[in-house]
Amino acid sequence: MTSSAAQYQGTSSDEDVSRRLLDSAAMLSYDPATEVDWESPLPADLYGLNPEWSTLYGTPLWDEMSEEQRVTLTRHEVCSIMSTGIWFEMILQQMVLRDQYAKNPGNPEFQFALTEIADECRHSIMFARACEKMGVPAYFPGRGTIELGRVFKTVASAEVAYGGILVAEEVLDVMQRDWMRGENVLPVVRTTSKIHVVEESRHMKFARQEIRERMEGVGATRRYTSSVAVAAGAYFIIKNLVNKGVYAAAGLDTERALDAVRRNEHHKSMLRSSCAHLMDFLAQSGLLTKPAISIYKSIDML
């Protein structure tokens, strides 16, 4: 038997996954303080995100906008998404800490959970600095959503907690894979997106494994309630990705812009495509019940 095989013999699949993720984190992690060029001026003609990911791209209103307005809008949109990311990363950290409270610190699962929290702290600071660099103020969800988030992070556990984490990370992952490759996207956004994609890939693997473990042998009632709770979390995340204040910041009429967003089939299609892999996993895990499907369809994730 090889030393590697001996190392993993007698451990659970959850421990195996966590140990491999710890090894990966040790080999490939980034320090945004040094990896991101925080000093160079921003090129005036580059977008905050790929235009195709703008909520107004493909609408008549987008065609009417000046290039300066398009650049401004995409910079505010990406900062709104980053701000929402910070908000949810605060929720995520508290849920993971609660889940690992008083567990064996020698367990690889415990150690990777703390590694993930450390990553999320750096990501939140990175996003905050990126928004400051772009000169965009923080965007926050509404007061009602903030309070619901407070409840969610307090009561969500097991597959609901990790399902909420996975939903937020999967949706952003697909977007950022495009942003990091976008030659017409600001370097600060491309680099922060690359860092987030690399490190969040480990977090998503961890969340999927935790969901698989927690869903083993669960009954129909728990599967039903958990599926709805995860979908409800997704609803508030998606609804708060792009704050309505971004349109006024670009010199647009807010109500007209919101109406264009509601009618924008291109953006809806982009969002559905970004969620395809996530929906497959939720279905395989037993977390895609009829009520959950209705919620996902209402926010164009299905």
Image (tube, grey):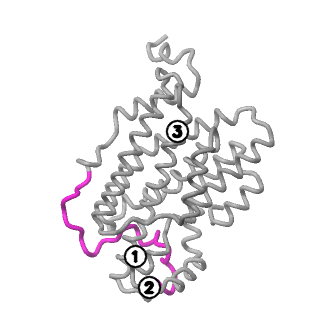
Residues at discs 1 and 2 in contact (Cβ within 8 Å) = yes
Name the kind of residue labelled 3 in the image: Val
Question: Which residues make up the magenta segment?
Answer: 36-62
Q: Nearer the viewer, mark 2 or mark 3?
A: 3
- Return the residue at label 3: 96
Q: Is residue 48 left or right of residue 144?
A: left
Q: Residue at x 57, y 82 (%)?
A: 259
- Return the residue at label 1: 73
Q: Residue at x 57, y 54 (%)?
A: 149
Q: Is residue 270 magenta?
A: no
Picture layout, residue 257 above or below residue 276: below
Q: Nearer the viewer, mark 3 or mark 1?
A: 3
Picture layout, residue 78 above or below residue 19: below
Viewer-proximal residue, 190 or 105? 105
Q: Is residue 274 left or right of residue 36?
A: right
Picture layout, residue 170 above or below residue 218: below
Q: As drawn, which residue projects farthest toward the bottom?
A: 64
Rendering coords of residue 246 (x, y %): 43, 75
Name the kind of residue labelled 1 in the image: Leu
- Could you tell me which quadrant the C terminus lies in? bottom right
- Within 10 Å of the Cα at label 2, are there few (<14), some (14-19), or many (20+) other Cα atoms? some
Q: As drawn, which residue projects farthest toward the right?
A: 220
Q: Tag 3 or tag 2, which sits nearer the N-term?
A: 3
Quarter of the image for residue 21 reads top left
Q: Is residue 23 left or right of residue 226?
A: left
- Return the residue at label 2: 252
* Element carrying mark 1: helix
Name the kind of residue labelled 2 in the image: Leu
